[in-house]
Image: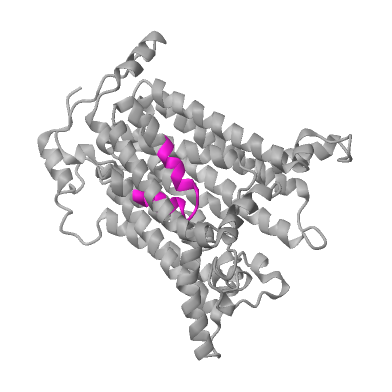
């Protein structure tokens, strides 16, 4: 097959490449035709695809702010935070963490989050408290929430910008992120976009072949929420396969430096406060909606729960250290399987595919799966598998869980709003749809001809230095020994297109 001869042929058009979008397009006349205006002729127009995407994400975040507005004054009477679906940790923890009293995170109060999140809380909360002392008539909680919502929204917009930068030939993939109801309802529930923004910029730095900067950003992200550090695992395995271990070591050094530089001052001088995050995670029981929660519910159908008549999940619920060890072991085993898949796949997997799998299996086996953790997966699945149909099904399950979770909270202090089985069903559907996404990504790694990103890019657009190196000899011998043939390399990108990409 000859190489594409024009930029039009190399730019993805979802109405042609995505079956779900192609079906929807029939309502407006079908996919774009052969005689439509070419991309070159449209360059002078203001509303290009990236600008449309950025406008859409701003619109979604504006609606998100409106959706949370009933809770901004902090007057949460009659469970308004649940009936209006506007609960946010940001406002609740302004008071719970003592920021309204001027307490400095970690110094005066042991914050339950990693240090970069605590620094951020203090950086916005303490000035708001000082302003409130000067002007007692202002609502400090409202000011604090809105300041956080603004910064977190900027980080969300920046994350959309990174998606566009990483997929210049597939700009409409970022619309999955920009229009997501997940973004609408969870963007400012907690400070997760701190870690997401840093992780996305870390992936972009790696794609641009800046491994030290990538490591620094991932390390900072890991100091805000732990999960960005998990991306170092995919980098390591891909580095082994591509013989680019030196680049990985530079990223690892950057990550260690950034994490240590942000953590050591608190760990040395305020050790008890620093330990709070780790102690809390170590002692937390089974949380709402997890695999373990579902199992405990099923146990209760056949066992009374009394000593000597407990199912395995109920027993684990009463023995948290054992539950911790089992959760960690299952996660490690799943990550080892992902690493083996990465080494044995016929063609070297894309970085975002492996990163998505690692974060997803961590959530599947974790004993804690807070509602806003879904945001961790959203940009990664856009990069890993930008297929609208499966992502919409997953989104419906996530929004269903979001609704059932608030109904469960409403009934936790009195008469149940929904049967417990309904909440468990919503939790199960969320778990199943994430597992399905994992399975689909694994399938496309093993059968790279099904990967739509491969249809647009000859190499991994996130791969950075990995793209310059053939597979290590030992991995080739291993696949030959296992009779796994490597997919022939795709033809090189024509020089004019490379030049257009660089500009």
Does the image show residue 297?
yes
Q: In this view, does 184 lie to the left or right of 417?
A: left
Taking 218 as reference, is 272 above or below it? below
* Magenta-drawn stretch contains 224: yes
* Camera-side residue of 12 and 438: 438
Of residues 414 and 66, the one nearer the viewer is 414
The location of residue 269, given as percent across then percent down, is 51, 62
The answer to whether residue 458 is seen in the rendering is: no
Residue 429: percent from left, percent from top: 63, 41
- The image position of residue 320, as x and y in percent, is 72, 43
Q: Which residue is drawn at 54% across and 68% down?
A: 105
Q: In which quarter of the image is residue 466?
A: top left
The answer to whether residue 206 is magenta is: no
Q: Nearer the viewer, residue 156 or 61?
A: 156
Quadrant of the image containing the N terminus: top left
Residue 404: x %, y % from top left = 67, 53
Q: What stretch is highlighted in magenta?
A: 216-233
Q: Is residue 147 above or below residue 465?
A: below
Q: Left or right of 327: which side holds 57? A: left
């Amino acid at each position: 097959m000859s190489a594409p001869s024009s930029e039009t042929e190399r730019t993805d058009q979802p109405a042609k490449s995505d079956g779900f979008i192609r079906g929807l397009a029939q309502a407006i006349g079908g996919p774009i035709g052969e005689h439509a205006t070419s991309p070159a002729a449209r360059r002078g127009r203001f509303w290009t695809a990236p600008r449309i995407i950025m406008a859409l994400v701003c619109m979604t975040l504006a609606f998100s702010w409106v959706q949370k507005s009933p809770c901004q004054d902090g007057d949460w009477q009659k469970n308004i935070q649940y009936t209006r679906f506007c609960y946010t940790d940001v406002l609740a923890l302004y008071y719970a963490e003592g920021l309204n009293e001027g307490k400095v995170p970690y110094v005066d109060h042991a914050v339950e989050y990693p240090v970069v999140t605590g620094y951020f809380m203090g950086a916005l909360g303490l000035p708001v408290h000082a302003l409130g002392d000067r002007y007692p008539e202002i609502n400090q909680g409202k000011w604090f929430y809105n300041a956080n919502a603004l910064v977190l929204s900027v980080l969300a917009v920046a994350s959309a910008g990174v998606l566009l930068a990483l997929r210049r030939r597939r700009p409409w993939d970022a619309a999955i992120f920009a229009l997501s109801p997940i973004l609408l309802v969870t963007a400012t529930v907690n400070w997760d976009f701190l870690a997401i923004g840093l992780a996305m910029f870390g992936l972009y730095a790696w794609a641009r072949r800046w491994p030290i900067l990538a490591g620094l950003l991932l390390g900072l992200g890991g100091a805000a929420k732990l999960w960005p550090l998990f991306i170092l695992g995919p980098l390591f395995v891909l580095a082994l396969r591509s013989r680019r271990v030196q680049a990985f070591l530079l990223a690892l050094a950057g990550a260690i430096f950034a994490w240590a530089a942000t953590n050591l001052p608190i760990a040395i001088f305020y050790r008890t406060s620093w330990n709070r995050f780790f102690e809390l995670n170590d002692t937390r029981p089974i949380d709402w909606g997890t695999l373990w929660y579902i199992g405990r519910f099923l146990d209760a159908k056949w066992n009374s729960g009394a000593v000597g008549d407990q199912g395995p999940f109920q027993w684990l619920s009463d023995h948290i250290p054992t539950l911790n060890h089992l959760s960690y072991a299952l996660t490690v085993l799943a990550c080892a399987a992902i690493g083996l898949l990465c080494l044995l796949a016929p063609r070297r997997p894309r970085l975002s595919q492996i990163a998505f799998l690692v974060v997803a299996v961590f959530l599947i086996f974790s004993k804690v799966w807070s509602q806003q953790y879904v945001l961790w997966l959203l940009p990664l699945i856009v990069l890993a598998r930008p297929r609208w149909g499966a992502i919409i099904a997953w989104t419906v399950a996530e929004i269903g869980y979001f609704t059932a979770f608030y109904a469960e909270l409403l009934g936790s202090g009195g008469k149940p709003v929904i049967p417990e089985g309904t909440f468990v069903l919503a939790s199960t559907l969320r778990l199943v749809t994430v597992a399905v996404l994992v399975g689909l990504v694994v399938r496309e790694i093993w059968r790279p001809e099904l990967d739509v990103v491969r249809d647009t890019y000859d190499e991994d657009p996130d791969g950075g230095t990995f793209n310059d190196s053939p597979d290590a000899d030992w991995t080739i011998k291993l696949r030959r020994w296992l009779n796994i043939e490597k997919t022939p390399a795709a033809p090189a990108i024509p020089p004019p297109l490379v030049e257009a990409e660089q500009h």
